[in-house]
Amino acid sequence: VGKTSAFIGPFVSSAIITASGNNDNMPFAFLFGLGAISTVFLWMVDTEKSRIECEAFVLAEADRKAFKTDAG
């Protein structure tokens, strides 16, 4: 994903600048908006529920011996 966004990002920024009448600051407003929306979605994540689900997953995988190695 990192290489793709590094390739596509300048094209998106150029399109935003062109669409805004050559305003070089508009890509920063777009990125700020993406960050703000992402922050809202991350704030809605129930970390306690996630912690419980993760613990249950690890215990289930341990019962299947998924983490065992031949050396151990």
Image: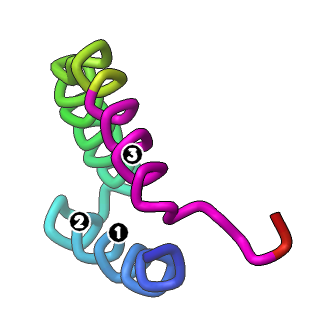
Amino acid at dot 3: Phe
Work out whether 19 lies above or below 45. Answer: below
Q: Main secondary structure of the magenta part?
A: helix
Q: Secondary structure at mark 1?
A: helix
Q: CA distance from mark 1 to mark 3?
A: 9 Å
Residue topped by disc 3? 28
Q: Which residue is mark 1?
A: 13
Q: Nearer the viewer, residue 47 or 1?
A: 47
Q: Earlier in the sequence, mark 3 or mark 2?
A: 2
Residue at (22%, 19%) from the top-left corner? 49
Could you tell me if the residues under marks 1 and 2 are in contact, i.e. CB atoms within 8 Å? Answer: yes
Locate residue 43: give its quadrant.
Answer: top left
Front-most of 61 and 19?
61
Residue 61: x %, y % from top left: 41, 54
Secondary element type, mark 2: helix
Q: Position of residue 25 (x, y in %)?
A: 39, 47
Residues rendered magenta in the picture: 53-70
The quadrant in which the C terminus is found is bottom right
- Residue under circle 2? 16
> What amino acid does circle 2 point to?
Ile
Count neighbours of disc 3 (C-alpha within 10 A) and say few if under 14, some if 14 to 19, many if 20 or more: few
**Considering depth in this image, is 67 or 8 the residue closer to the camera?**
67
Outermost residue toward the top? Answer: 48
* CA separation in Å, label 1 and label 2: 5 Å
Q: Residue 57: where, in percent of width, then height?
A: 33, 43
Name the residue rendered at 14%, 68% in the picture.
19
